Amino acid sequence: MSTTHVHPATEHSCCNAKPDTANTPSSAHCASGTADHDQSAHQVHASHGTVEGWSGAARITLHCLTGCAIGEWIGLSIGILLDLETAPRVALAIVLAYLSGFALTLYPLMRDGMDFRQAFKIVWIGEAVSIAAMEVVMNLVDYHLGGMRRGMSLMHPQYWIAFSAAAVAGYLAAWPVNYWLLKSSVKKPCH
């Protein structure tokens, strides 16, 4: 049985499936459309125990939720501590959710030798779409459950109930989006 060499940077979770083929040593793994790719990708996925489809989308969505929730929580907490109005509080939470979501995806790629520009080109569209779906739902749920209410305390149970419900709702909203991104080859399954 032949082995397939895969650049370590592509073995990390949630990278998009269409890198710059001229500059990426892993183009045989991430590029789509050839029989060789299909066979080698299945070998790599099988060797890492990756499950595609809804299970792969669930793993990608959990990864996305981790990044989004970190930024969202920091943004909302700063907004609450500074007693910001709702709109700036939400804007800060969204910006920080995008930053932490992208950082969580880009860091492993850059740690394994990709420069920022190359790594960003690989992941930007899939992460932007996934995070957008999650953020819209998270902020709507959090707002409607009173977690963003002006005068809210970080110690108030309402804040934590709203944030927890928002995280679950964001996950459920982004899961089918990530399934579609996988099926459309915009993202590859997490390893």
Image (tube, rainbow, N blue to C red):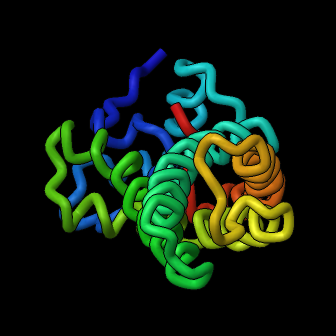
Pinpoint residue 85: horizontal percent, then vertical percent: 56, 81
Whether residue 108 appears in this view of the structure is: yes
Q: Is residue 4 above or below residue 53?
A: above
Q: Residue furthest top?
A: 1
Picture layout, residue 53 above or below residue 90:
above
**Where is residue 171 drawn, in percent x and y?**
75, 50
Residue 172 is left or right of residue 86, and the answer is right
Q: In the image, residue 79 lies at what x, y percent?
A: 49, 66
The residue depicted at 37 percent of the width and 42 percent of the height is: 10
Judging depth in this view, the residue of 34 and 125 nearest the camera is 125
Q: Residue at x 58, y 64 (%)?
A: 131
Q: Quadrant of residue 47?
A: top right
Between 174 and 48, the residue placed more toward the observer is 174
Report the number of discs.
Answer: 0
* Rendered residue at 61%/61% (across/down): 185
Residue at the spot 62% in from the left edge and 20% down from the top edge: 49
Q: Residue furthest front?
A: 151
